[in-house]
Amino acid sequence: MEKFILTTTPTIEGHPIKAYLGAINVNIVIGTNFFSDFAASFTDVFGGSSGSYQRKMDAMYESAQKELEKKAKRLGANAIVGFRTDFDEISGKGKSMFMLSATGTACKVEERKDAPEMQTNTSFIDALRLKQELDKDKLMEKLNKASYLNYIHEEDWAYMTDHPSKDAVKILIEKFYFEMSAEEKTKSEALLNFLDYNEASEIIHDFYRNLPEGVMGTTEATHCSLVGDLIRRCSLFNPSATISLIASSPGKAADILDSDKPYYNAEDMRLMKDIVSMFEDLPDVGEKAVGKNGMFSKEKELYICRNGHKNEKEYEFCDACGENIKGLTRGNIKKIDQFKVKVETLSRLFGEMQL
């Protein structure tokens, strides 16, 4: 199904439920500025129309639907049934927050030709959506023009948190990640986690793939390590992206094999088996030769790594850069072996689900 269905009913007419994928929930919170804005429009309320209040509630409701849909899609769902919401006020230490909790059951439904058509009203655009789009364009212009991270102010971070955008996060990560403080890196990770898995994974793997690969101790190697850690912390392992990376940079691909993704399906397992096979069939990038490993030494069999360092034949890993004849380090080999165990375990678990 191309269109995602979200309904408060337990069933969907004309779309039989093939599988229930689990209950899901999200919480959307608005801080004290919500109440400040509300208090500023008291005349609106006392006049008999709580328009400002209602617009805030509508924005929270819409955001909750989008977040719940993202969670469901991560599970492989194409619909949510039993959608429910609940509003609560959270107060403490002189501060107040407003929270909307949304729940539902993610499921996989079948599309039938005789099912009633799901209609979407596209005959109007409300003012709130227009304002959000204008605010987003303004932020994107600022991010594109900014030369330094200190041009991005606290209100910009707050806006990106309230309105997660793939385009904004992509620019923020690619332009500024390596100059960020620890606190700013934490904020960036939070923004990645607010995005749909596929969107976040695409951003971070494109960034990782385009980073220059460096030898141990270089700035390039440090940058690769930092982004690899980001992939691990945000659980953004992507089997398909890893396969693409093996062909050009097997060491970089191996380094992120210890990362995870939120959920695994049968297609993931198939691709992960392909990853194992590709590492087992890696071609040599170094070479074996006969020569001298020093001006006064005798000729002997040598292993020359891809970086041109000469090593005696019995050394599996280069003494200078730590790579073997395949271009992999000891750390890479260890992660590949651990990945093989993970794939075997996943295969067993999927086999048990079929019993």
Image: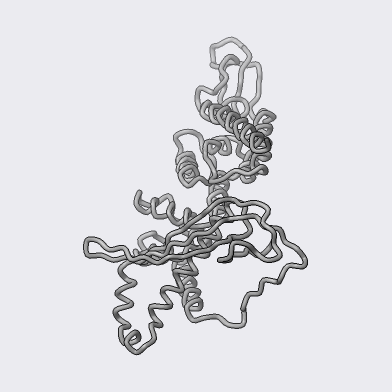
Closest to the observer, 251 or 92 = 92
In percent of width and height, residue 350 lies at 64, 37
Question: Residue at position x 59%, y 10% from top?
Answer: 298
In percent of width and height, residue 245 lies at 62, 42
Q: Quadrant of residue 10?
A: bottom right
From the viewer's perspective, is 37 left or right of 341?
Answer: left
Question: Residue at position x 60%, y 23% from top?
Answer: 304
Q: Quadrant of the C terminus?
A: top right
Extreme-right residue of the structure: 113
**Residue 146 visible within the image:** no
In percent of width and height, residue 74 lies at 57, 52
Question: Residue at position x 44%, y 69% from top?
Answer: 60
From the viewer's perspective, is 294 left or right of 222?
Answer: right
Against 43, residue 262 (above or below) is above
Closest to the observer, 329 or 67 = 67
**Residue 280 visible within the image:** yes
In percent of width and height, residue 96 lies at 28, 66
Against 332, residue 184 (above or below) is below
Q: Quadrant of the N terminus?
A: bottom right
Q: Quadrant of residue 336?
A: top right
